[in-house]
Image (cartoon, grey):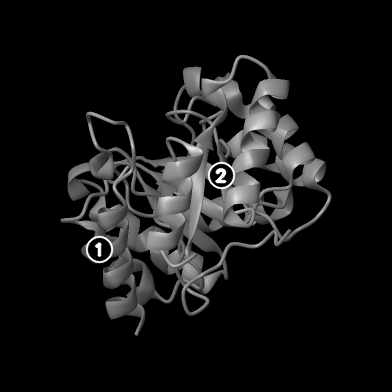
Amino acid sequence: MKKTPNYYQDRVCLNVLANSIENAKACYEAAEGHVVLGVLSKNYATDELAIEDMKKYQEATGNALSVGLGAGDPNQSQMVTRLSEVLQPQHVNQVFTGAGASRTALKQDETVVNALVSPTGRPGFVNIATGPLSSQAPVAEIPVETTIALLKDMGASSIKYFNMKGLNHIDEFKVVAEACATHDFYLEPTGGIDLENFEEILRITLDAGVKKVIPHVYSSIIDSETGDTKPEDVVTLLTIVKKLVG
């Protein structure tokens, strides 16, 4: 199965949550295949149960599987690595300290492995203390350029920038996008992205020249009654992607 995400015009691939196999299929079709579908490791009691279920998502979507932590829970980091080694998905979500382990376990460089960092309030700096222990320690503010170099050393593919809520960190995000473009690194904005601010956030990354972007749009497009991601909203997101990418 294909291990690299299916980017629209080789630039943008959506990332949305899948609530079921049927929901995954519907969202995959709505995105015309330009999507990876998040399935959260935290929802499974054991590795075996997760692997059995996630394989079904892979079969239904041509391996457009994104192995998730579960609300960015750093305690899921090792489980994500174990699952990814077996499943060989197109996309892996990790905390900063887990990216290297996941890449080593995958034994290939096609799968996208991100690493979660967070805003600091200081443009040009990000917090890399997002692991199981480090997230409980004092904040580690590191220059974005150094962060990218560290992640390249570890075999990661992209910065997962959490969060974008209310665009409070938009100035910081612009600097991150520019650094990713300059240093040939991918970018994954996440947290608080909705149909209203999606276009502005994506435009910032594309205008900066980021080579590949994987925006995560989660709770804002989930039906509160069914728990399903709304395929019609995925269509809207793809329409915006097409408009901006051209």
Residue extending furthest toward the front: 22
Q: Is residue 73 above or below residue 85?
A: above
Badge count: 2
Report which quarter residue 191 is drawn in. Answer: top left
**Label 2 sits on residue:** 115
- For the residues marked 1 and 2, what is the alpha-carbon distance in whole angstroms? 27 Å
- Of 199 and 128, the residue lying toward us: 199
- Of 108 and 228, the residue lying toward us: 228
For the point 69% across and 31% down, which residue is it? Answer: 51
Indicate the amino acid at tag 1: Thr
How far across and how far down the image is residue 123, in percent?
A: 33, 53
**Label 1 sits on residue:** 236
* Helix, strand or loop at mark 1: helix
Residue neighbourhood size for the residue with mark 2, other residues' Cα within 10 Å, grouped as few (<14), some (14–19), many (≥20): many
Residue extending furthest toward the bottom: 246
* Helix, strand or loop at mark 2: strand
Along the horizontal axis of the image, is 95 left or right of 3?
Answer: left
Along the horizontal axis of the image, is 240 left or right of 43?
Answer: left
Residue neighbourhood size for the residue with mark 1, other residues' Cα within 10 Å, grouped as few (<14), some (14–19), many (≥20): some
Q: Which quarter of the image is occupied by the C terminus?
A: bottom left
